């Protein structure tokens, strides 16, 4: 069965994921470092992990399978999930692939270096309605691909 995992701390699309999951009857694991509100739904589970660095990431990676979709802005987490066979996308609708992760991680390192040198700054761009729309489209496409794969196995 397909499950959705949300790297929930500072994730702007939790409610959108809940709506999509409800429509498809999917389980959602909301993984966070602190308690947060989630809908009262037997398919939505809040998992609060310790404050240890990468605790949420480790919890997700230990459990994901090739039938799962992970929503995260954390590039190393996305890479780890892809290596476990899961699908991963960010809240702006970017679908991560194993082929592109090397370039994505290298760009991340370059950006971090440039920030340290004072060459760039300002943080990420604000989240827009277009980002939400791209995310919903990408999530739906990933779910449909897994459902198609599931039907072919029957």
Image: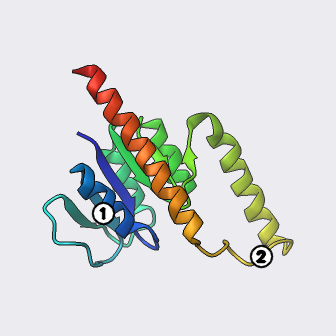
The residue carrying pointer 2 sits among few (fewer than 14), some (14 to 19) or many (20 or more) residues within 10 Å by Cα, namely: few
Q: Secondary structure at mark 1?
A: helix
Q: Earlier in the sequence, mark 1 or mark 2?
A: 1
Which residue corresponds to mark 2?
Answer: 121
Q: CA distance from mark 1 to mark 2?
A: 33 Å
Q: Position of residue 34 (x, y in %)?
A: 33, 77
Where is residue 123, by image quadrant?
bottom right
Where is residue 54, by image quadrant?
bottom left
Q: Position of residue 58 (x, y in %)?
A: 38, 54
Question: What residue is rendered at 78% in x and 71% in y?
Answer: 116
Q: Would you say residue 71 is visible in this rendering?
A: yes
Which residue corresponds to mark 1?
Answer: 18
The residue carrying pointer 1 sits among few (fewer than 14), some (14 to 19) or many (20 or more) residues within 10 Å by Cα, namely: many
Residue 55, compared with residue 96, is above or below; it is below
Where, quadrant-wise, is the N terminus in this rendering? top left
Q: Position of residue 119 (x, y in %)?
A: 86, 71
Rendered image: mark on residue 30:
none
What is the total number of numbered labels drawn onto the structure image? 2
Question: What residue is rendered at 48% in x and 52% in y?
Answer: 137
Where, quadrant-wise, is the C terminus in this rendering? top left
Question: What residue is rendered at 41% in x and 51% in y?
Answer: 70
Instruction: Report the side of 50 relative to 74 (left or right).
Output: left
Instruction: Report the side of 114 relative to 137 (left or right).
Output: right
Between 108 and 67, the one nearer to me in the picture: 67
Q: Position of residue 146 (x, y in %)?
A: 36, 35
Q: Would you say residue 66 is visible in this rendering?
A: no
Comparing labels 1 and 2, the label whose residue is closer to the camera: 1
């Amino acid at each position: 069965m397909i499950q959705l995992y949300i790297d929930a701390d500072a994730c702007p699309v939790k409610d959108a994921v809940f709506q999509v999951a409800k429509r498809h009857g999917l389980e959602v694991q909301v993984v966070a470092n602190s308690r947060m509100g989630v809908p009262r739904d037997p398919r939505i589970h809040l998992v609060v992990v310790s404050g240890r660095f990468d605790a949420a990431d480790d919890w997700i990676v230990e459990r994901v399978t090739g039938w799962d979709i992970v929503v995260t802005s954390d590039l190393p987490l996305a890479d780890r999930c892809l290596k476990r066979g899961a699908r991963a996308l960010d809240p702006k609708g970017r679908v991560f692939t194993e082929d592109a992760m090397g370039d994505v991680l290298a760009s991340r390192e370059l950006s971090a270096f440039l920030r340290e040198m004072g060459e760039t700054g300002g943080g990420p761009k604000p989240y827009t309605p277009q980002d939400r729309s791209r995310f919903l489209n990408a999530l739906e496409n990933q779910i449909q691909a897994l459902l198609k794969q599931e039907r072919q196995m029957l």
